[in-house]
Amino acid sequence: MTSPGPREHRSADGTLRRFNMKLMQWEVVVENSENTPGKSDAPLLALPGKQYPLKFDGSDFHINGKFVRLPNGAASRRDPQDQQDADTADSVWDSSVVLAKLLENNPDLVRGKRVLELGSGTGLGGISAALCGAQEVVLTDLPYAMPLLRKSIELNGVADRVKAEVLDWANPPVRLGYSL
């Protein structure tokens, strides 16, 4: 009896990922341009790692004088073989840290507005928008990330103006009606 071939997934941007059963993790498959239209043999560019090694435990990151707390994402992490695109919702991306500080320094971008955050993950961007005066914030992600987002809302005391909803980019609603 032969074992099934490797589990593969091609994301919307065309990136091919293959699940490595030995390491129990997803890996990006580099495809050469001869076999893949639109792909290049040029090296992949990537940052060396996190540039902002923050804990988000209420002691090391604040927005408008309020410390921001984020839950440990391990609770939302599914078994590797059940993941799709590596379940990235439990990561705090450097870009969300930069966005949070950008909003803190430019609160007029969100003050009094309705904000929709796509692919919220831990919710740092949207929670920061709320702390900077957004009237209403909706954090969105896939179903597996909802417990993590709800915990982030609770930890930061913003439930009066922030909520979490499931939104799959592949099947968005027709009209969203948000300012930002």
Image: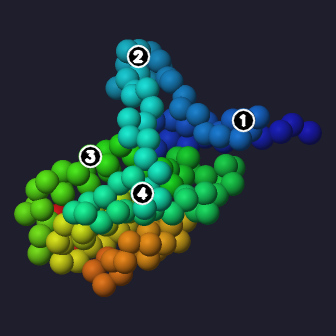
Quadrant in which the N terminus is drawn: top right
The residue identified by callout 3 is 98
The residue identified by callout 1 is 23
Question: Where does residue 122 sit, x and y in percent of width and height?
Answer: 43, 60
Question: Where does residue 9 sit, x and y in percent of width and height?
Answer: 55, 43
- Label 4 amino acid? Ser
Question: Where does residue 126 sit, x and y in percent of width and height?
Answer: 29, 64
144 is higher (above) or lower (below) than 40:
below
Q: Residue at x 78, y 41 (%)?
A: 4
> Of label 4 and label 3, which has the lower sequence position?
4
Density class for disc 3 (Cα within 10 Å; few <14, some 14-19, many ≥20) is few
Tell me: 172 left or right of 103. Answer: right
Give the distance between the C-alpha atoms of the residues marked 1 and 3, in whole angstroms. 32 Å
Q: Residue at x 30, y 66 (%)?
A: 66
The residue identified by callout 2 is 43
- Label 1 amino acid? Leu
Mark 3 and mark 1 in contact (Cβ < 8 Å)?
A: no
> Of label 2 and label 4, which has the lower sequence position?
2
> Of label 1 and label 4, which has the lower sequence position?
1
Give the distance between the C-alpha atoms of the residues marked 4 and 3, in whole angstroms. 18 Å
- Label 3 amino acid? Val
The residue identified by callout 4 is 59
Element under disc 1: loop
- Label 2 amino acid? Pro
